[in-house]
């Protein structure tokens, strides 16, 4: 009887041990299965990220080439280095570093892909802006070429008038030019009633002047008063009932100007500013000079002509 009880006890213990062994085996098999599945998932994500990194890198190479072409076009039109050049150079350094580095952990690879996505968005923004500015510059060149052809056909004395105007403008710039910062990328347009642009004096009702103030020194940023002063090619101010006479403290000494429009602006490093002026009477046929001033001198000027 004692032997039978011992046998049953041993059988029970063995059964319990077998059950425990089976349970532990299933547990570790399941854990191993989950581990393998997680590894496969991570490997799939790594492969996808590597492919995305390569795709974005190739897109960035194409965008960099596109920017180089646009920059060359811009500098040929404007005659100065594009303000975005330094930004793009910095982006190119970051992109080259990311492309050259090889990482194994997913966190670093995700960070690289996100950094490339950010660089792509910023480069797209720069390219879009530069392409738009190039289009505007080409339109201005075409308009100036067209205006010049019209003037040459309309008046045989035009070349002499242009020379006189250039001398008068050069004299004005030498006398009042501010050496601190300048207005560039001028656009001057005239409009008649009905919101239609015109180059004919008898239809001109308003003048629209826009320009860029870039690389403004920190000392001159903040609140500033700007003046739009318009004269004919003899330097005579165009009459306006709201004209403001003021003295500009130019580097060469005080200069009296008559401004048709004034504007209080809060200058930052870079901005696009515009003036709109409604005339009391229609403008006469002739050449005109529009100057933009601050209290320190002339920031920039542009010329235009109205035909009959």
Image (spheres, grey):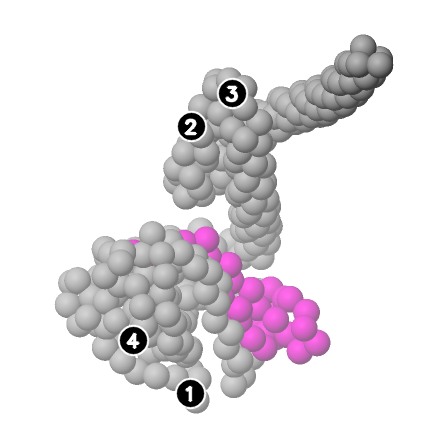
For marks 4 and 1 on the same chain, the one whose residue lies earlier in the sequence: 1
User: Would you say residue 142 is visible in this rendering?
Assistant: no
Element type at mark 3: loop
Q: Are marks 4 and 1 in contact (CB under 8 Å)?
A: no
Q: Position of residue 22 (x, y in %)?
A: 78, 18
First along the sequence among labels 3 and 2: 2
- Left-right relation of 203 to 93: right
Counting residues from the N terminus, which is met first, the one under dot 2 or under dot 4? Answer: 2
Element type where label 2 sits in the image: helix
Q: Which mark is residue 93?
A: 2
Q: For residue 182: magenta?
A: yes
Circle 3 residue: 103
Specify the farthest residue to the bottom: 241
Q: Nearer the viewer, residue 144 or 222?
A: 222
Crowding at mark 1 (Cα within 10 Å: few <14, some 14-19, many 20+): few
Q: Which residue is mark 1?
A: 242
CA gap between label 2 and label 4 equals 48 Å
């Amino acid at each position: 009887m004692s032997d039978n009880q011992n046998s049953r006890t041993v059988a029970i213990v063995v059964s319990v041990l077998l059950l425990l062994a089976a349970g532990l085996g299933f547990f570790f098999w399941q854990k191993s299965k989950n581990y393998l599945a997680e590894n496969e998932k991570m490997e799939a994500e790594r492969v996808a990220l590597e492919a995305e990194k390569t795709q974005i890198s190739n897109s960035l190479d194409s965008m960099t080439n596109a920017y180089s072409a646009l920059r060359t076009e811009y500098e040929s039109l404007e005659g100065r280095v594009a303000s975005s050049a330094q930004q793009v150079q910095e982006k190119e350094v970051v992109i080259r570093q990311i492309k050259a580095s090889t990482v194994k952990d997913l966190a670093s690879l995700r960070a690289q892909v996100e950094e490339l996505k950010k660089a792509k968005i910023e480069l797209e923004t720069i390219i879009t802006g530069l392409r738009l500015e190039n289009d505007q510059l080409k339109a201005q060149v075409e308009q100036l070429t067209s205006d010049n052809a019209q003037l040459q056909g309309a008046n045989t004395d035009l070349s002499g008038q242009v020379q006189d105007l250039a001398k008068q403008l050069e004299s004005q710039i030498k006398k009042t030019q501010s050496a601190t910062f300048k207005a560039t990328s001028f656009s001057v347009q005239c409009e008649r009633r009905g919101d239609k642009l015109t180059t004919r004096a008898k239809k001109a009702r308003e003048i629209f002047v826009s320009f860029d103030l870039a690389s403004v020194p920190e000392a001159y940023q903040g609140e500033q008063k700007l003046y739009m002063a318009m004269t004919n090619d003899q330097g005579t101010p165009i009459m306006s009932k709201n004209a403001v006479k003021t003295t500009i403290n130019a580097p060469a000494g005080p200069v009296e100007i008559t401004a048709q429009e004034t504007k209080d602006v809060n200058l930052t490093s870079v901005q696009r500013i515009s003036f709109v002026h409604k005339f009391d009477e229609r403008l006469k046929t002739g050449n005109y000079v529009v100057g933009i001033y601050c209290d320190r001198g002339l920031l920039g000027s542009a010329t235009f002509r109205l035909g009959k």
